[in-house]
Image: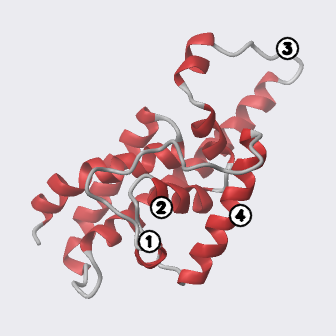
Amino acid sequence: MDFERLYRTGYSRVLGTLIGVLGERAAAEDCAQDTFESAYKGWKSWRPDAPAEAWLHRIAINTAISYRRRQRLRQVGEVIRRLGRPALPPDPASLVERSDLLKALRQLPAKQAAAIVLRHYHGYGNREIAAALGVPERTIASRLAAAKTRLRVALGAGTLPAMSIQPEPGVHSED
């Protein structure tokens, strides 16, 4: 597979993953650009023993995790600057744009959110998610269980129904 084909076939999937993990399209687009830039720079070192798309998702998830860390640092800085001032009310337009699920996903640790998005948006099985994230399958199972528990609490559901994030057409889970 050449890099141009990987970009054409993988961009929308990577973007969907990043939207699910980050919850904001603009941030996801920035991270997608950074993902493909990093992948392009590392393309010569990619080994064909693992699927290129799994390698690409690994880069994307790591990029999202780094982005979230930078965002938290910025938020801490903003809080420190605003100490003593009353908090501004949230913008009603931005509240409408964000679904409860995206808000709940944003509250999850990035690694749990990544596992949920790869499972329920892309329909990947534990083996595929483990390959994409570079961790054992058992780790994925525990991340998914922990994420679902947190989502139940955040969404106020006694049981978590099928996720409202729809998988891409033609993608089915192995599990």
Q: Residue at x 79, y 22 (%)?
A: 82
171 on left or right of 116: left
Quarter containing the N terminus: bottom left
Q: Residue at x 63, y 33 (%)?
A: 100
Marks 1 and 2, the one that precedes in the sequence: 2
Q: Amino acid at mark 3?
A: Pro
Residue 89 image point, x, y percent: 74, 12
In front here: 78 or 92? 92
Q: Which residue is mark 2?
A: 119
Q: Which mark is residue 125?
A: 1
Residue 81 image point, x, y percent: 77, 26
**SS for tag 3?**
loop
Mark nearest the camera among 3 and 4 is: 4
The part of the image, by quadrant, that contains residue 136 is: bottom right
Mark nearest the camera among 3 and 2 is: 2
Q: Amino acid at mark 2?
A: Arg
Residue 16 image point, x, y percent: 38, 46
Q: Which residue is mark 4?
A: 146
122 on left or right of 22: left
Instruction: State if disc 2 and disc 1 touch (CB < 8 Å).
Output: yes
In front here: 65 or 81? 65
Q: Residue at x 28, y 56 (%)?
A: 36
Q: How many marks?
A: 4
Distance of label 3 from label 4 (alpha carbons): 35 Å
**SS for tag 1?**
loop
Q: Which residue is mark 3?
A: 86
